Amino acid sequence: MALMVRRLVQLYVGLALYGLGIALQVSSGLGNDPWDVFHQGLSRRFGLSMGAWIIITGAVVMLAWIPMRQRPGIGTVSNVVLVGVFADLFLWLLPAPDALAGRWAFLIAAVLVGGFATGCYIGAGLGPGPRDGLMTGLAARGHSIRVVRTAIELSVLAVGWLLGGTVGIGTVLYAVAIGPLTHVLLPRLTVRTPTPAPAPEPEPAGAR
């Protein structure tokens, strides 16, 4: 029970921090990560808040799991709903920095917070995010996960840029840094479930 409570707390802390990371990067104005270029482009072109488009996109992507027979967990559903909610909340709370030094501080904080948040919610082991599940589901069909991830992120980046999303140095920095950060942090944030003890072997007949 205590272990599950810890996993749930870590999951929801991770999702809240993920929303904070998105808000920091968007507020920096130096370039969003590829998916958020897409979400921001949709918001600018069609209205609704950026967080609303994060939720809508996550739900549509999760529907794409059905033909791949991917199974969502509580972490997946929570990711779909809460990341967008927290992103909108923090975008409303955060001041927009005017000075270049402040914008860079927001960007660097966004990358660090995003790496920690990713380790938290994946390490909780309660289901991948919808976009991660799409990539692993396609990779399970015989494609390289690196190729699948690159193709998806370049596609959403291009569409988002055409829709008016912000592309810049922050986009490149996030793409370069998030992998190594997650590689370092994920093992430290992964919740280890206890391995059940092996069942005792039956005693030989007549042994008493």
Image (spheres, helix red, strand yellow):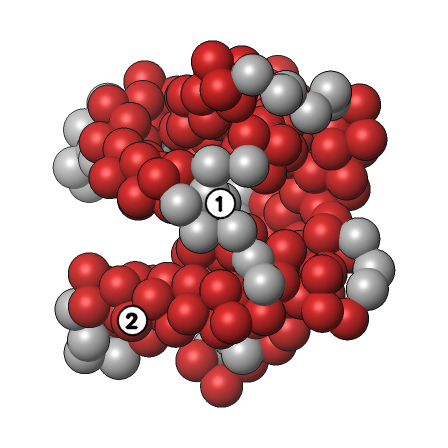
Residue 151's disc is: 2
16 to the left or right of 167? right
Residue 32's disc is: 1
83 to the left or right of 28? right
For discs 2 and 1, the disc positioned in front in the rendered view: 1
In x, y percent, where is residue 109? Answer: 47, 19
198 to the left or right of 86? left
Q: Quadrant of residue 202?
A: top left
Q: Give the mark nearer the N terminus: 2 vs 1.
A: 1
Q: Residue at x 54, y 78 (%)?
A: 64
In x, y percent, where is residue 30? Answer: 47, 37
In x, y percent, where is residue 89? Answer: 80, 32
> Does residue 18 appear in the picture of this structure?
no
- Relative vertical location of residue 180 with respect to residue 94 in this rendering, above or below: below
Q: Residue at x 49, y 86 (%)?
A: 67
Q: Secondary structure at mark 1?
A: loop
Three-letter code, disc 2: Ala
In the rendered image, the residue lying farthest to the bottom is: 67
Q: Pointer 2: residues within 10 angstroms few (<14), some, or many (20+)?
A: few
Residue 192's disc is: none
- Relative vertical location of residue 122 with respect to residue 49 in this rendering, above or below: above
> Does residue 203 appear in the picture of this structure?
yes
Gap in angstroms between the C-alphas marked 2 and 1: 17 Å
Three-letter code, disc 1: Asn
Q: Residue at x 42, y 70 (%)?
A: 158
Of residues 76 and 48, which is closer to you in this image? 48
In x, y percent, where is residue 3? Answer: 55, 21
